[in-house]
């Protein structure tokens, strides 16, 4: 009898100890970067004069960093709705910041800022403006720029093509798309030149297949003395979109005008990419996830995944005992998107009785 009493006490002690350890794991873990948007390498400067105010210079850095963040998570049209956000509102969304590389050169103050914005506060702020933010995912795409001179019936892919020469001259750290241009190949040029009379219907799959990239953009520019007509075939996330633009009174020989045109095209492609990765905050899908409470490594992996998936607006521990732990998740998207996001975190889920179990 004493043996069974001891065994019972041992079992209770084991349950208590397991629950206590689980409690420590769940509630003592802190997440810094998962809960924040980090904006780095913001350079600030100001003349070092009698009326020099360091705080005012830092505030300008805050404004620049907030604009860069908005550029990554909102489309160009939506940014117009929030471009006049006050510095007080911006500061209210900052968790912390760091100043580095401070120096004075020729009576000029220079420094570099790194700012951590509170992710939930930023997303709530954007949601209140009736804007759907986007997941700030970077992506590498193949860009095939084809310049056609309709007056001389000439076609250019590499040489004498300002879009090929200048496309990657100016790169901003808030841009999500990184562009790979095709290497100069006379065979590729010959095939494109042979299709000059029907270039829009030309099959570029052979050229695209030479590069290990899923996404691509075929940019066709028709140029004459009066206007420029542009057709973009944008293939992102296995979705093809056609975009047509017309520009008048633009001289491609003028570097400033050519640069403005390239910037406008890049904005179009960035907006298309963001639309593909939009977070629909109007969708609030409740999900329950079950994990074995004795598998502490898996619990940690699930928590890290839930913290790092931007479409998850919140999650919390619903229940835990000596056998299982249940997480409640609010997801801004469809079940298919949720499974895809979890798969990207190397987590496989199985549905049973409206509960997702982690394998």
Image: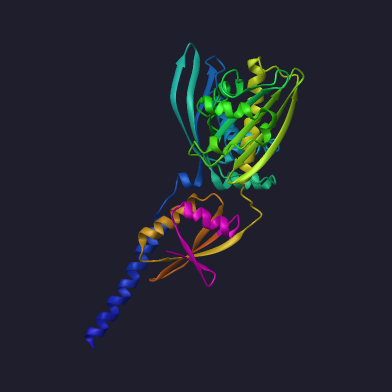
Q: Is residue 148 magenta?
A: no
Q: Could you say which quadrant of the image residue 90 lies in?
A: top right
Q: Does 333 appear in magenta?
A: yes
Residue 21, position in %: x, y?
34, 63
Quarter of the figure with residue 224: top right
Depth check: 101 or 223 in front?
223
Residue 347's place in the image compared with 52, above or below, is: below
- Please tell me which residue lies in front, 315 or 185: 185
Whether residue 26 is visible, yes or no, is: yes
Q: Position of residue 67 (x, y in %)?
A: 60, 33
Q: Residue furthest left?
A: 3
Percent x, y of residue 212: 48, 39
Q: Is residue 336 above or below residue 221?
A: below
Q: Residue at x 42, y 50 (%)?
A: 30
Residue 321 percent coordinates (x, y): 41, 70
Left or right of 111 on screen, residue 246:
right
Residue 83 visible in this rendered orientation of the protein: no
Instruction: State the extent of the magenta-drawn residues as a range.
Output: 330-359
Residue most toward the front? 194
Residue at image coords 63%, 21%: 259
- Taking the spot 23% from the left edge, 88% from the top edge, the residue there is 1
């Amino acid at each position: 009898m004493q043996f069974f009493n001891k065994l019972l006490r041992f079992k209770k002690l084991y349950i208590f100890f397991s629950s206590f350890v689980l409690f420590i794991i769940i509630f003592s873990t802190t997440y810094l970067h998962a809960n924040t948007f980090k904006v780095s390498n913001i350079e600030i400067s100001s003349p070092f004069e009698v009326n020099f105010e360091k705080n005012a210079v830092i505030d300008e850095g805050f404004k620049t960093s907030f604009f860069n963040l908005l550029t990554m998570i909102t489309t160009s049209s939506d940014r117009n709705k929030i471009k006049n956000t006050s510095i007080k509102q911006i500061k209210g969304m900052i968790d912390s910041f760091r100043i580095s590389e401070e120096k004075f050169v020729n009576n000029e103050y220079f420094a570099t800022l790194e700012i951590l914005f509170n992710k939930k506060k930023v997303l709530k702020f954007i949601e209140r403006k009736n804007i759907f933010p986007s997941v700030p995912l970077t992506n590498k795409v193949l860009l095939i720029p084809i310049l056609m001179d309709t007056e001389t019936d000439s076609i250019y892919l590499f040489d004498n093509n300002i879009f090929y020469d200048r496309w990657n001259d100016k790169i901003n750290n808030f841009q999500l798309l990184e562009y790979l241009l095709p290497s100069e190949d006379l065979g590729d040029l010959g095939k494109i030149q042979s299709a000059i009379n029907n270039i829009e219907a030309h099959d570029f799959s052979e050229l695209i297949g030479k590069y290990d990239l899923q996404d691509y953009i075929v940019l066709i520019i028709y140029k004459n003395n009066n206007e420029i007509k542009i057709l973009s075939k944008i293939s992102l996330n296995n979705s093809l979109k056609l975009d047509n633009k017309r520009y008048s009174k633009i001289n491609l020989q003028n570097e400033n005008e050519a640069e403005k045109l390239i910037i406008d095209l890049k904005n179009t492609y960035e907006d298309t990419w963001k639309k593909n990765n939009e977070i629909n905050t109007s969708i609030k899908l409740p999900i329950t996830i079950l994990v074995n409470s004795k598998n502490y490594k898996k619990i940690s992996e699930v928590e890290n995944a839930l913290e790092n998936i931007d479409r998850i607006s919140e999650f919390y521990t619903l229940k835990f005992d000596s056998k299982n732990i249940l997480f409640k998740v609010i997801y801004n998207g469809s079940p298919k998107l949720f499974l895809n996001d979890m798969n990207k975190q190397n987590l496989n889920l199985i549905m049973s009785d409206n509960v997702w179990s982690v394998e």
